[in-house]
Image: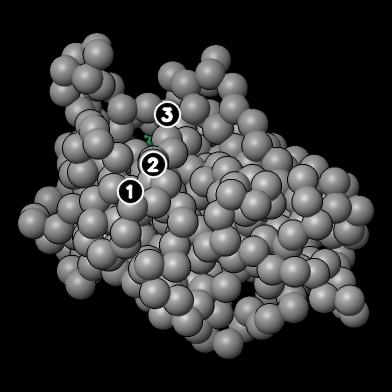
Amino acid sequence: MSEIETIISGVGSYLPERILTNAELAKTVDTSDEWIRSRSGIAQRHLAADGQATSDLAREAAWAALGQAGLKPKDIGLIIVATVTPDKTFPSTAVYVQEKLGTPPCIAFDVSAACAGFIYALNIAHGFIASGQVKHALVIGAEKLSCFLDWNDRGTCVLFGDGAGAVVLSAETPSVAGPKRGMLATYLSADGRLAPHLYADGGPSTTGTVGLVKMNGKEVFRNAVEEISGAVFEVTERAEVSRHEIDWFVPHQANIRIIQSCAKKLELCESKIIVTIDKHANTSSASIPLALDAGIRDGRIKRGELLVFAALGGGLAWGSALIRY
Ligand code: UT7
C-alpha cells in the first residue's frame, strides 16, 4: 500500500419519514413498550414507504455525503452499497444508486456481510484508494429490513428498522505535520459455522424466495459482545494506539445492552459512545454511518478525533475500523 491517506471527506444519512413507535407496534404484536425498551433500548424505528426501494434510501444518504464533501456525482470513481435488502437479486443496488445520482460510468457493486457490511465495504474502498485506483469512493450502508421481517415473530420484528448512511472516502496526500489521518487500521472476520444463529430462510438458489429473518437472539448477543470488543482491541493494537485515546466509539446499534457490555470490556466511558438505537432501532449495515452522521451533526464528533467503528451480524461476520476523522 502507498503513503496515500484515505480520509472521510463527507458523511450523510437518510431516514424514511414514517416512524413506528413501540406503543403502536404493541397494538398488532404481542409485546410492550416496556419489554422492547428494557431488553433492547429501542423506542421507535423508521419504516420505508411501499414505493421506496433500498436504492432510494441510499441515494438520499449518498447525496448528503457528497454535499458535505463538496463533490459532484461525476467525481466518484467507486460506489459500494452494503446491504442485505437489495432492490433486485441482480444487478447490484449500487448501479441503481449510480443511475439515480447521475454518476457517469464507474466501479459499482454491493457487499453482503449483513450488519458488518458497512465495515467490510469501508475496508474494500480503502484498498481501492490506497492502491491509487480511485480518488473518491461512496461507501453506503442501506437497508429496507421491514420488507423481510416476520411481523408475527415478536422475537425479531420489534428490533429492526429502515434507513441509510453514507460516507465519501477520498485520497489525500499526508500532511507533514500532525498525526496520520483517515483510515488507520481495519479488521474483518466471519465464521460460517455460526450462520444458523442469524439468517434469512430463503434465497434464489434454495427456496426461490426472499425469506424472513430468523435469529437466535441469545447466541448472537453473546457472540456480539465477545467479537465486537475483540475487534476493537485488534484495531487499536494494529495501529499501536491506546484504547484510552479513542474519542468516540461508534458501534453497530443492535442492542443497548450489547453496546454497554462492550464498553465495559473496553473500559470506555459511556459518554464516549454514540447511541442511536433508541430512535433508529437496528438498521443493519446502515446503523454505523447513521450514528456517525448523528454524532457529527449534533457537534459531538469533530475533525481530528479518533473514532472506532465495530459491528457483528449475520454470518456471523464482524469487523472494526479505527479512523482519525
Ligand atoms: O444486528 C444483528 C445482531 N443482532 C443482535 O445483536 C441481537 C442480539 N440479541 C438480543 O438483542 C437479545 O437477545 C434480544 C433483544 C433479541 C432478546 O433479549 P433476551 O434478554 O435475550 O430475551 P429472551 O430471548 O431470552 O426472551 C425473554 C422472554 C421470553 O419469554 P419466556 O420464555 O422467558 O417466558 C420471550 O418469549 O421474553 C419473551 N419475548 C418477548 N416478550 C415481549 C421475546 N420477544 C418479546 C417481545 N415482547 N418482543
Direction from residue 105 to residue 316 in the image, left or right: right
Cα separation, mark 2 vs mark 3, equals: 24 Å
Nearer to us: label 2 or label 3: 2
Q: Is mark 1 within 8 Å of ligand 1?
A: no
Residue at 59% x, 49% y: name it. 133
Direction from residue 275 to residue 146 in the image, left or right: left
Quadrant position of the N terminus in the picture: top right
Residue corresponding to mark 2: 109
Nearer to us: label 3 or label 1: 1
In front here: 161 or 3? Answer: 3
Residue corresponding to mark 1: 94
Q: Is mark 3 within 8 Å of ligand 1?
A: yes
Secondary structure at numbered mark 3: strand
Direction from residue 27 to residue 190 in the image, left or right: right
Residue at 49% x, 27% y: name it. 315
Q: On residue 198, which mark appears?
A: 3
Ligand 1's image quarter is top left
The first of marks 3 and 1 along the sequence is 1
Cα separation, mark 3 vs mark 1, equals: 24 Å
Direction from residue 79 to residue 86 in the image, left or right: left
- Picture coordinates of residue 186, whole percent (x, y): 71, 47
- Picture coordinates of residue 69, whole percent (x, y): 50, 77
Which three-letter amino acid code belongs to the residue tagged 3? Answer: Leu
